[in-house]
């Protein structure tokens, strides 16, 4: 049996092939990598940083390689290209000393084909070391790092200026946002925790820490269940349900459980529904750490129904996740336009199920962490056009802390990664509030 690699760059090289060549999500590849698990914490952090930066800047890195090569690489030499990418990103964007970046990259050229390209690898990386800064200064980073289909989609939906602002927001690593369990009690507790965590208090009530703050489990309050990790944009759909204390609320597609926790902390009688047993286990572990209670149901939400219609339903639907590229830059490299159609079909089935679960007069909030209109307003338009017994309830400006630019013309929530730029941005999120008629 082959021993897992202990060199963090060797592990990164293996994982890069998993993502780019085998089209696996980075999180899944990391979770299943024996080599990654065998590394020390510091080396695991290096692997994550290498891969996240490379995936975020892949367009620029590939442009550098193309510019510095005298002739294109032959087809079928993906391993050579990936090794060049790994060396180039260290020189161009991670401030790795040239001798370290070049030597460690060459050390990975262990197969016959890679060894045969050592001269090319050395020459190209040396050139990037010499000319990289000048070449990068001439690049259009936002365009190069954004797949064409996404750029065109965002330009059509939000305008060219907004599309560029979105793409530029994706160039930086996302901060860490925390939602306090005590936030249901009042602002004094939030301010005390902000001071204790050395965090910035956002207008939304979330606490924001800069990227790279350290292991989450080591932060004050983790063991005590004082807070959970949740981008500030993801806190907004729960708010659209209004006062939920004492109300029966179904949270569909509930894992990893941030919205379930928020509803429970606000006093709702929550039923969390999740199809994946593994993801449900994670949700239940989070609730246990937080000391919060919810009924959990492992089931396919398209077929499951509560015993009786409920007061409110929150559906955070499975989607392309294009609103979360700051956190998951691999999504931009893995998703294709054709993937959207399969997702929208599922979203329609989930919406129809959610309508059936909601009692007359009850509230239904549909949400998706996607920037694609097909997964947001177009799903609601299709639902209404089909004659579903629901009516849109526009979101008021006061419900989104006075940010009128977070609302669509129809009155739906539409946050973009370039919003809250003065604080470091936020996830792209769509949410529509409906009333069951």
Image (cartoon, rainbow, N blue to C red):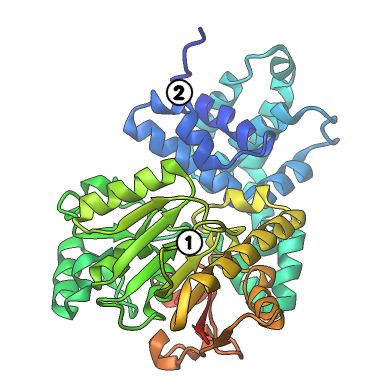
Q: Is residue 193 left or right of residue 72?
A: left
Would residue 259 be visible to someone looking at this image? yes
| 162 vs 375, nearest the viewer | 375
Q: Is residue 72 above or below residue 432?
A: above
Q: Is residue 189 left or right of residue 422?
A: left
| 123 vs 37, nearest the viewer | 37
Q: Is residue 293 left or right of residue 348?
A: left
Q: Please report the residue visible at 84 percent of the width from the left and 36 percent of the height from the top.
A: 72
Q: Is residue 241 above or below residue 222?
A: below
Q: Nearer the viewer, mark 2 or mark 1?
A: 1
Look at the numbered disc 1 and give the secondary structure of its residue: loop
Q: State the mark number for residue 34.
A: 2
Q: Please report the residue visible at 69 percent of the width from the left and 70 percent of the height from the top.
A: 374
Q: Can you tell which quarter of the image residue 149 is in?
A: bottom right
Q: Is residue 76 above or below residue 302?
A: above
Q: Badge 1: how crowded within 10 Å, few (<14), some, or many (20+)?
A: some
Q: Position of residue 86 (x, y in %)?
A: 60, 35
Q: Please report the residue visible at 31 percent of the width from the left and 71 percent of the height from the top.
A: 206
Name the residue furthest front.
307
Alpha-carbon span between mark 2 and mark 1: 40 Å
Look at the numbered disc 2 and give the secondary structure of its residue: helix
Residue pointed to by mark 1: 305
Q: Position of residue 150 (x, y in %)?
A: 71, 63
Would residue 208 be visible to someone looking at this image? no
Q: Position of residue 62 (x, y in %)?
A: 71, 45
Q: Please report the residue visible at 60 percent of the width from the left and 61 percent of the height from the top.
A: 322
């Amino acid at each position: 049996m082959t021993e897992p690699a202990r060199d963090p760059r060797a592990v990164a090289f293996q994982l890069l092939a998993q993502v780019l060549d085998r089209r696996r999500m980075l999180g899944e590849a990391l979770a299943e990598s024996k080599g990654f698990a065998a590394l020390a914490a510091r080396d695991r952090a290096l692997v994550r940083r290498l891969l996240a930066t490379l995936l975020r800047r892949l367009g620029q890195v590939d442009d550098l390689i193309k510019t510095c090569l005298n002739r294109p690489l032959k087809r079928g030499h993906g391993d050579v290209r990936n090794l060049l990418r790994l060396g180039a990103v260290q020189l161009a964007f991670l401030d790795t000393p040239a001798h370290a970046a070049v030597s460690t990259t060459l050390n990975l050229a262990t197969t016959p084909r890679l060894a045969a390209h050592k001269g090319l690898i050395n020459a190209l990386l040396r050139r990037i070391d010499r000319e990289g800064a000048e070449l990068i200064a001439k690049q259009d980073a936002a365009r190069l790092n954004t797949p064409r289909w996404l750029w065109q989609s965002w330009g059509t939906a939000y305008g060219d200026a907004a599309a560029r602002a979105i793409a530029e927001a994706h160039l930086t690593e996302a901060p860490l946002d925390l939602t306090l369990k005590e936030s249901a009690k009042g602002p004094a507790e939030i301010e005390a925790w902000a001071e204790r965590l050395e965090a910035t208090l956002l207008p939304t009530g979330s606490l924001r820490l800069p990227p790279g703050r350290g292991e989450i489990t080591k932060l004050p309050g983790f063991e005590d269940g004082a807070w959970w990790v949740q981008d500030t944009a993801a806190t907004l759909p729960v708010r659209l349900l209004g006062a939920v204390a004492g109300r029966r609320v179904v949270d569909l597609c509930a894992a990893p459980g941030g919205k379930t926790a928020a509803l429970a902390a606000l006093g709702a009688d929550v039923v969390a529904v999740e199809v994946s047993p593994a993801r449900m286990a994670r949700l239940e572990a989070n609730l246990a750490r937080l000391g919060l209670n919810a009924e959990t149901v492992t089931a396919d939400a398209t077929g499951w129904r509560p015993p009786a219609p409920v007061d409110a339903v929150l559906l955070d639907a499975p989607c392309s996740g294009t609103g979360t590229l700051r956190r998951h830059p691999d999504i931009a490299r893995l998703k294709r336009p054709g993937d959207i159609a399969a997702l929208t079909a599922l979203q329609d089935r989930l919406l129809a199920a959610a309508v059936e679960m909601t009692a007359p007069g009850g509230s239904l909030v549909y949400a998706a962490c996607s920037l694609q209109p097909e997964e947001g307003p177009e799903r609601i338009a299709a639902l209404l056009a089909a004659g579903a017994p629901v009516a849109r309830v526009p979101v008021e400006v006061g419900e989104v802390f006075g940010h009128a630019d977070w609302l669509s013309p129809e009155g739906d929530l539409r946050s973009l990664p370039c919003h809250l730029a003065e604080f470091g941005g936020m996830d792209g999120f769509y949410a529509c509030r409906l009333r069951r008629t």
